[in-house]
Image (cartoon, grey):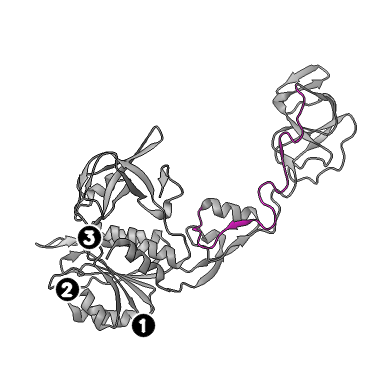
Amino acid sequence: MRYAEALNILKEIPLKIESEEISVELALGRVMSEDVVTSMTLPPFTNSAVDGFAIAHSGSVFRIAGTLFPGETPREKTPEGHAFEIMTGAPIPKDCFACAKVEDVIVETALGPVENARFVPGALGVKLKNPLRRDENLRFAGADYAPGTRIVSCGEKLRAAQLMALVSNGITRVKVFKRPRVLLISTGKEIVEPGHELKPGEIYNSTRIYLQNALESLGCSVEIAPTMADETSAFLSFMRGALKHAPDVIVTTGAVSMGSADFIRPALEELGAQILFHRVDIRPGKPILFARLGETAVFGLPGNPVSGVVGCRFFIEPFLRSVMGREREKPFTARLANDMKKPSDLRCFFKAQLEINDGEARVHLLNGQPSYMVRPLLQSSVWAVLREDQSDFAQGDVVEVYTEEASHLTQVPGDFA
């Protein structure tokens, strides 16, 4: 099965994630389950963008009528021949047409003129150095938000900037998708947790810590199951108990390939699962499995660490985006900085470094692409994706590029596919 076919299957699974209403104080990283439209005008009043003087009349010399501070009620009128000293953010009198910056005036005092003075005790008046344009240095009511403006959209992941916008509009609670409940199961009798001394033939369970944190960063609530040895009966017994709690997603690692110890698929079928795909034409991670078990989605990831990373980044993450109404991620494009040969008929996800010179994006494919090698992950900044229908790639060829984590993506320079 091609990767595009697998993505389409993931998109069609009708997993239902319920919504909940929470405080914006707790909403960072959560995904909106509805649009939010403001009823406010923001700013709610026209105000000064500078510390300076509010001008209502023609001319260049004015006496000072008083001082306006933020939080005051706007004045109705300015006396003829006068101007108000005004602070940034203070509402301007309704008859004023502009504000002059402090550095653009000369303050008249009994002792003579003073320039660049924010406040001069005993100031008698102010003289403009240059004529003011209408609306100069004003922040108009409704310039940021008008009633009916959408603040955030359904499917949008809330970052600090979105929370600022919501609170600016007086919104304190939002409806978000509940955190998908994910059960993470590691398999393999060779797998042990850090803190235990390794015996011959054992390795530490590095994939578990990666997936747990990656899934939590995607907004999931993750439960860690005890590591399963390669024993079908123990796995079946555990799964029957776990399914009573109806997790939204189950993720297993290991035991999905073609060996005699690879028991995940037959065990799932014994439980009544519908296998939607098993083995996708990709590298790394070709043995990946996806199934439905009642209302639960099941991902069977290969055991090698980077295969698990690719499975999470390019299968689980798109699935979660789909069920929570988020748009499918779009890659950008860049030119290869080095040659590469790959197997024909496989889409390859390569660890790479992104370079942008003179406005052109280039990716350097790293050494150390085998799926058991963790260290190159720390050296990479992006994933370069080499399509199935080509085996020999040359420097300068255009390829698709994805950031390490789509959840952190805003926009990256380059040509979008």
Name the amino acid, label 1: Lys
Identity of the residue drawn at 19% across and 55% down: 372
Q: Is residue 124 magenta?
A: no
Q: Amino acid at mark 2?
A: Asp
Q: Judge from the rendering whether residue 126 lies leftward or rightward of residue 336; answer left or right.
A: right
What range of the chain is rendered magenta? 130-159
Q: Nearer the viewer, residue 78 or 354?
A: 354
What residue sits 42% from the left and 73% below the top?
15
The residue that disc 1 covers is 244
Q: Position of residue 266 (x, y in %)?
A: 21, 78
Real-space CA distance between mark 1 and mark 3, rounded to the nearest whole angstrom: 30 Å
Residue 68: mark in rendering = none
Which of the 4 image quadrants contains residue 99? top right
Q: CA distance from mark 3 to mark 2?
A: 20 Å
Residue type, label 3:
Pro
Mark 3 highlights which residue?
194
**Residue 231, image x, y percentages:** 17, 77
